[in-house]
Amino acid sequence: MNDEEYGTCNCCGKSAPLSRKYFYYSIHCDCCNGDKHFHIVKHCENCTPKPPENIRISLEMLPDET
């Protein structure tokens, strides 16, 4: 059985079968299993995925060790 994802294309906004493109960034983060941060763009077969223009991250202060 073929489990194809169907939804809204992040590029053109049309409802269609989707593929995923992962964009990786050399930022250590907890949201991506503690490895490099990544962003997923879900796109239809007619669109070429592009990396996001803006990425919002939040930084958490480490406790003071003094």
Image (cartoon, grey):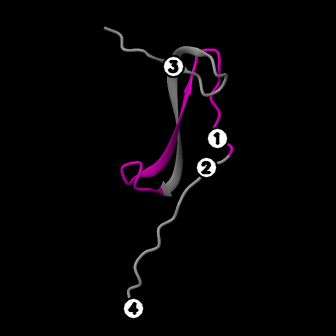
Q: Mark 2 points at which residue?
A: 55
Q: Nearer the viewer, mark 2 or mark 3?
A: 3
| Measured Cα–Cα span from mark 1 to mark 3 | 19 Å
Q: Is residue 25 left or right of residue 5?
A: right
Q: Where is residue 7 in the image (x, y as percent from the top left)?
A: 51, 19
Q: In this view, does 1 lie to the left or right of 51?
A: left
Around disc 4, counting alpha carbons within 10 Å, would you say few (fewer than 14), some (14 to 19), or many (20 or more)?
few
Q: Which of marks 3 and 4 is in front?
A: 3
Quadrant showing the N terminus = top left
The answer to the question of whether label 1 and label 4 lie on touching residues, with beta carbons closer than 8 A, is no
Q: Which residue is drawn at 41% across and 48% down?
A: 32
Q: Name the residue under label 4.
A: 66
Amino acid identity at mark 1: Pro
Q: Which residue is drawn at 42% across and 75% down?
A: 62
**Which quarter of the figure has residue 45?**
top right
**Which quarter of the figure has residue 13?**
top right
First in residue order: circle 3 vs circle 4: 3
First in residue order: circle 1 vs circle 4: 1
Q: Name the residue under label 3.
A: 7
Amino acid identity at mark 4: Thr
Amino acid identity at mark 3: Gly
- Of all residues, the one furthest to the bottom in this rendering is 66
Quadrant showing the C terminus = bottom left
The answer to the question of whether label 2 and label 4 lie on touching residues, with beta carbons closer than 8 A, is no
Q: Mark 1 points at which residue?
A: 52
Q: Which residues make up the magenta segment?
A: 28-53
**Which quarter of the figure has residue 49?**
top right
- Of all residues, the one furthest to the left in this rendering is 1
| Measured Cα–Cα span from mark 2 to mark 1 | 7 Å
Around disc 2, counting alpha carbons within 10 Å, would you say few (fewer than 14), some (14 to 19), or many (20 or more)?
few
